Image: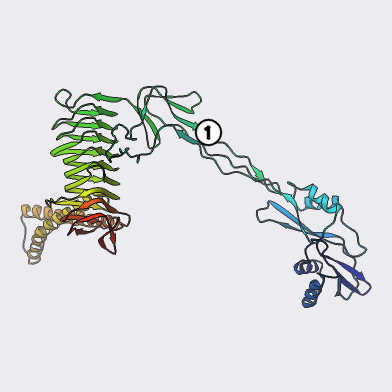
Amino acid sequence: MNGYFRLVNQEGKTLLRLFPPTGAGKPLDVNDVVEYLTMKDYACDLPTLKRAVDGAQEAEQEIVVGNETRFPERECYNLTVSPDRMQAYAKFYAASVGAEDMTEEEMLRDLGHRGIKCGILTDAVHDFFIRREYCKEILVAQGKDPVQGKHAYIEYKFNTDKKAKPTLNEDGSVDFFHLNILNHCNKGDVLAILHPEEPGEAGENIFGDRIQPAEVRKETLKYGHNIDLSEDRTVLTAQVDGHVELVEGTVFVSDELVVENVDNSTGNIDYDGNVQINGNVATNFQVKAKGDVMVKGVVEGAQIEAGGNIIIARGMNGMGKGVLKAEGNIVSKFLENATAQAQGYVTSESILHSKVTAGSEVNVDGRRGFITGGKVSATGSINVKTLGSEMGADTIVEVGADPGLKERITQLQKQIGEDTKTLQSVQPILVSIKQKLAKGAKLSPEQVQYVQSMAAVNQQKTEAIAAANKELEELQKQVGNPSEAVVRVKGEVYPGTRICIGDVSMMVQKNAHYCRFVRERGDVKMAPF
């Protein structure tokens, strides 16, 4: 039993008797005594009280706390309610010697008067009155916590990762039969399952106030053509064989357009879904698809645009005029004399005299793995086996900024230069005319019209330059953080190759092997791989 105390009321004075703990009980806390005496309006000398409490750890103590006749104090308790109003703790104090004890019914009735009407732990209260233990906090009421519900969620039965990459063979070449990019589906395939939300259960605090659980998020299945929705609106299944993808939360299934070749027999192709070409794409033809474009043969000097990925199993010789544009990724066995732009990554076994830009990374580190001539740009990284050539072909690799962003910067700089030249030709004319007018010269109607047109040009170009400079300033801020950008060379890099990271660059002066190029302290540095 914990140490405790009780008052002894006598004629003309009041004593405080302190009892030591027994067994594994805790010693008396002086704060409990001070709290009780303050509550009952008894004064005491604090140093004397502390000495008595310390002594009461071993033996019973007694001190005077009043020099007047007082009525005895009944057994009582102090109630503490937690800040969240979910728990109530009672700490009981013994009655004065000879005074009455509180009853269990009285205690429960008092809790009700204090407004506590829910979660009262009657067993804990009953236990106290069976075996009284003072100066100990007892949990007498416990509120009910709300049961939180579960958000609804959608389980997609196909790969929704737009960054999935093709499989590499052991020799480093790309396995065009296992690209991990296209999501084929068959008629009747389950595409998505909606797991509905589970509402929670309200709780209540010890005063009976309801506590609502957090709101749960609801979901609905969004889908396009060629898809069936179950009667309970929780399952999507494919109506046709085709290709499934998730675009901004909506599931689409598109049939594939399959042709043998794109040439005079087909003409240009413009298709809403995916296009599969079992053969080749001939020079000067165009293929446009809102989905993916898969070419199992070669692409010559043609143009291919895809809302998804472009895959060319046998590569592309652009002949200086071939263009690939993909909102997803580009995978081609080789790229030669071509222009390729991907918002995702570009993967190839070799890039020769081409202009290649990628929103994330360029990987040319397969079995052949070389970049020779041209310009290759990526926002994140370029990974290559051999960079440049012994013949010194002009080769530029660039990382650390969105290629599209840098192209826009170039456009703005060119626009500002052209508009500035126009202003330089217009403003002297306006100044001259203003001087003539100040001297009293009069203008003919034709001259007035000419002056007005020059003034309009001056205002238009001035505003255009200001807007372009503002946009240029914002874009240049985005260019200046290439800390994650890197060029990795797993084989050899040749002299004459230019490495650009963000807005700084370096020209490779001598052969180097198995290295990487990073930006450190405002310069491009070569570092160990």
* Horizontal arrangement in the rendering, residue 36 relative to residue 155 (left or right): right
Find disc 1 in the rendering and name its residue.
Answer: 196
Out of 168 and 26, give the one closest to the viewer.
Answer: 168
Q: Is residue 101 left or right of residue 416?
A: right
Left or right: 49, with 214 as reference point = right
Displayed quadrant of residue 423: bottom left
Residue at 17% over, 53% down = 415
The quarter of the picture where residue 199 lies is top right
**Side of 267 where 147 appears, left or right:** right
Colour mode of the rendering? rainbow
Q: Quadrant of the N terminus?
A: bottom right
Front-most of residues 394 and 249: 394
Specify few, some or many for label 1: CA neighbours under 10 Å numbering under 14, 14-19, or 20 or more. Answer: some
From the viewer's side, name the closer residue of 230 and 499: 499
Query: Percent from the top left, x then y, of residue 441?
Result: 5, 63
Instruction: Give residue 254's quadrant in the image.
Output: top left
Amino acid at the residue labelled 1: Pro
The residue tagged with tag 1: helix, strand or loop? loop
Relative to 46, say whether 257 is above or below: above
Regarding residue 150, the answer to whether it shows in the image is yes
In the displayed structure, would residue 265 be above or below residue 96? Answer: above
Residue at left 18%, top 49%?
Answer: 375
Residue 276 spot, x, y in % from top left: 26, 28
Residue 306 at least partly seen: no
Q: Residue at x 42, y 22 (%)?
A: 188
Query: From the viewer's perspective, is residue 229 above or below residue 448?
Result: above
Q: Position of residue 312 (x, y in %)?
A: 23, 34
Give the image location of residue 289, x and y in percent: 26, 31
Q: Is residue 241 above or below residue 381?
A: above
Q: Quadrant of the C terminus?
A: bottom left
